[in-house]
Amino acid sequence: MNIIVAFPKLDDAKGIKNILVRNGYEVVGTCTSGAQVLSMADNLGGGIVVCGYRLPDMMYLQLKQELPADMEMLLITTQLHQEECRGTGIMCLTMPIRVFDFVNTIEMIAGNLAFRRKKRREQPKKRSEAERTIIEQAKAVLMEKHNMTENEAHRYIQKNSMDSGTNMVEYAQMVLKIMYRDR
């Protein structure tokens, strides 16, 4: 899990980093400005930003709005500022933080990110119009030449693409190439 720690004072950031490292987490960076966080986050492909309420160049809410969608934020702040955080989709802990609560919150956010990542991978891949056309053409050829139903042609392409280790579009292209070669 990629974790970035950002506080205006480097010593505060290092203190939070040390807690995380002692509890088995890898911290990819400690930052003292929002610009540093954004630069680092753009190259990570997801993770958690642990930060304070105000950085020298931006407030936590502006930082959250500019972070990539696959980055979550844990705000560590005072009770007063925590009230402002309600409804923003940002997790908050009040200072002084208890290590147990902090680590459990990080674990919860990490679990949520992993769950969302898994759900995204499980969603069927969106095909372009050109890819759908190739598959439809291959099904039409199979239906015509081999007297298959549309479902049978689809299953044939799907099964053989899995068996051959190619995706459906590549296999459909191969079907078209072979069928048109035989004409």
Image (cartoon, helix red, strand yellow):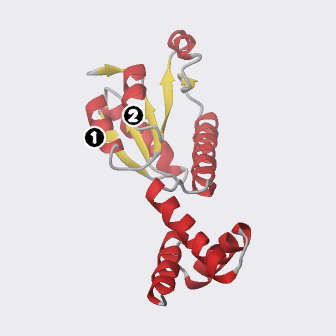
Residue placed under numbered mark 2 in the picture:
67
Q: Position of residue 183 (x, y in %)?
A: 48, 87
The residue closer to the viewer here, 135 or 13, is 135
Q: Residues within 10 Å of mark 1 (few under 14, many from 20)?
A: few
Can you say whether 61 is above or below 19 in the image?
above
Measured from the top left, where is residue 30 in percent x and y?
A: 34, 41
Quadrant assignment, res 53: top left
Q: Quadrant of residue 15?
A: top left
Residue at the spot of label 1: 39
- State the image coordinates of residue 99 (x, y, percent, origin top left): 58, 37
Residue lying at 54% horizontally and 24% vertically, measured from the top left: 96
The circle on residue 152 is none
- Residue in the foreground of this view, choosing between 15 and 172: 172
Relative to 135, is 57 on the left or the right? left
Q: Residue at x 66, y 74 (%)?
A: 143
Of mark 2 and mark 1, the one earlier in the sequence is 1
Q: Position of residue 19 (x, y in %)?
A: 49, 43
